Image (tube, helix red, strand yellow):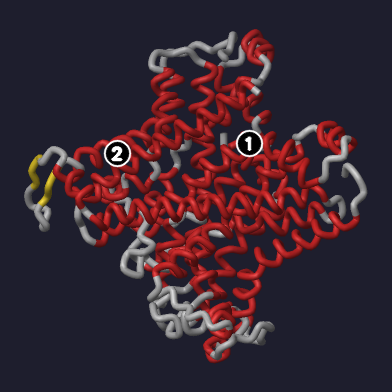
Amino acid sequence: MVENRPIATFIAHAVLIAGVAIVAFPLYVTFVASTLTYEQIVTVPMPLLPGDQLLHNYTQALSSGSERGSHAAVAPMLFNSFVMAMGVAVGKIAISIISAFAIVYFRFPLRNFFFWMIFVTLMLPIEVRIIPTFKVAADLGLLDSYAGLTLPLIASATATFLFRQFFLTIPDELAEAARIDGAGPMRFFRDVVLPLSKTNMAALFVILFILGWNQYLWPLLITNQESMYTVVIGIKRMISGGDATSEWNLIMATAMLALLPPALVVILMQKWFVKGLVETEK
Amino acid sequence: MEKRVVFRSAWLPYALVAPQIAVTLIFFFWPAAQAVYYAFLEQDPFGQSSRFVWFQNFEDLFADSHYLASFKITALFSVLVAFSGLAISLLLATMADRVVRGALAYKTLLIWPYAVAPAIAGVLWAFIFAPSIGIATFYLKRLGIDWDWLLDGDQAMLLIVVAATWKQVSYNFLFFLAGLQSIPRSLIEAAAIDGASPLRRFWTIVFPLLSPTTFFLLVINIVYAFFDTFGVIDATTQGGPAGATQILVYKVYYDGVKAADLGGSSAQSVILMLIVIALTVAQFRFVEKKVQY
């Protein structure tokens, strides 16, 4: 603080509190709606204090889903989302760290070409190649499968860059010492590079887990069976159209269940989250 | 930068890059090449036969008033999302940079929407503004505003802008806060001693020094508005009413998946690819610039 201006400090707090309130408002409304009965929600205006249906709504959403719209239970969807998020995060980290290792620690023909190929994937988001990618996945028999949900998404230019940048900062002396001691490249990778990369992996994991959990377009295309829906897709399918006909109490309970896991990851692993965010977006 | 010490193996490096290269070839390059190829084909509605039509699909697109309208809608949408997102988060970051007490709590309470999926952000705001039962709709009607985004295109646009901005503020906030905290205190103190008011200090010192961050965030926000808001739109307006919120990405999806117009949708994909390439180049120009600082 440069100078003491109580009024300015007061205004700063007031603006921040207003900001926090506006940011939190949808979450609060969602939470309240998830504790009400359907009849309470469709009365206008909806009550703004929590009701007593919390347990009932969440149990029903988890075990049997809504009665209108899609009838799928939410518990398996949460499991699918979890598998997808873990698959995408672990898959991206695994294949990126080994390709970055190869690109940094070896000299081989086509090295720059491969690096360039990985880089170009940045310019090919799923949105610009929807139908052909879907066809490839269908031809490979990946529809309605966990492999189909994760495999097409695990190439990662940003993760590869991040690891490459990091490996370049590892002192050459370590590799030299490992070679003198007779350690091969994979031994060096396992005993030196991997332990040193732990913080980077943790930071990336937080970002990629959220990214995987929140995927929308790809699971929308590739899942037809209710048993393979992720929770984000499931919510969309519960809205049966026409705003008073959907069971908003159950939809809102599902929304809470869908947003809590990634939100908790952000809040509890805030340090890794901020590090990951700042380092991946370059 | 290169390593001086390297390992030697004839096959190992290829084996290590193989999984990533396989995924990029099968799921990125091959489909992208096909999208380009389809863009020059015309297919009959049953998918039985197709013929090479050169730039016919592109000519049709640029003669199509819906497509041109979609361009304008996308431009308006991304400008609104980027501008309001940056303005709100800059205000909040400036205030958060000022306070000492409770700084961490404010930060935590402001960044969690990053974790919310765009589609869910859409559902939350659509519920609050639902035409018949929404809590905000109720108060808007009391103020004499006839709110129904299912019928009114401008209101539908406003809804998706609010939902998309709400989710993105947390991201911008973190980067602005980091940018603010890296500005040397001595500069601001010197200006304060010279008698510059906080507002004057902000516009003459802080804001110019933040310009690399602002430019970077501007590109990121435009990319976000172009591509990552698909979920927001699909969960709320679905491009409606009457195409008023049909941004380019949604139109590609709609024409390709719902309307099964392969050639037209692929031609749109190719145009989107060119836009992504331009944006990525802009983003990397920024990185180069930052290195020189």
> Which residue is situated farthest in the front direction here?
B195
Q: Residue at 42% of width from left, 24% of height from top?
A: A116
Give SS at disc 2: helix
Q: Residue at 39% of width from left, 49% of height from top?
A: A147
Looking at the image, tell me whether mark 1 or mark 2 is earlier in sequence order.
2
State if disc 2 and disc 1 touch (CB < 8 Å).
Answer: no
| Mark 1 → mark 2, Cα distance in angstroms | 35 Å
The crowd level at tag 2 (other Cα within 10 Å; few <14, some 14-19, many 20+) is many
Q: Is residue A101 left or right of residue B243?
A: right
Mark 1 or 2: in front is 1
Does any portion of residue B43 appear in the rendered image? yes
Q: Which residue is mark 2?
A: B32
Note whether B108 is above or below A249 in the view shown.
above
Does any portion of residue A60 appear in the rendered image? no
What is the x, y in percent for residue A111? 43, 18
Q: Which residue is mark 1?
A: B211
Q: Nearer the viewer, residue B98 or B26?
A: B98
What is the x, y in percent for residue A233? 43, 64
In the picture, which quadrant includes the C terminus of chain A?
Answer: top right
Note whether B87 is above or below B39 in the view shown.
below
User: In the rendered image, which quarter is residue A1 located in?
Assistant: top right
The amino acid pointed to by label 2 is Ala
Circle 1 marks a residue in which chain? B
Note whether A220 is above or below A172 in the view shown.
below
Circle 2 marks a residue in which chain? B
What is the x, y in percent for residue A79? 51, 62
> Which residue is situated farthest in the right direction here?
A4
The amino acid pointed to by label 1 is Ser
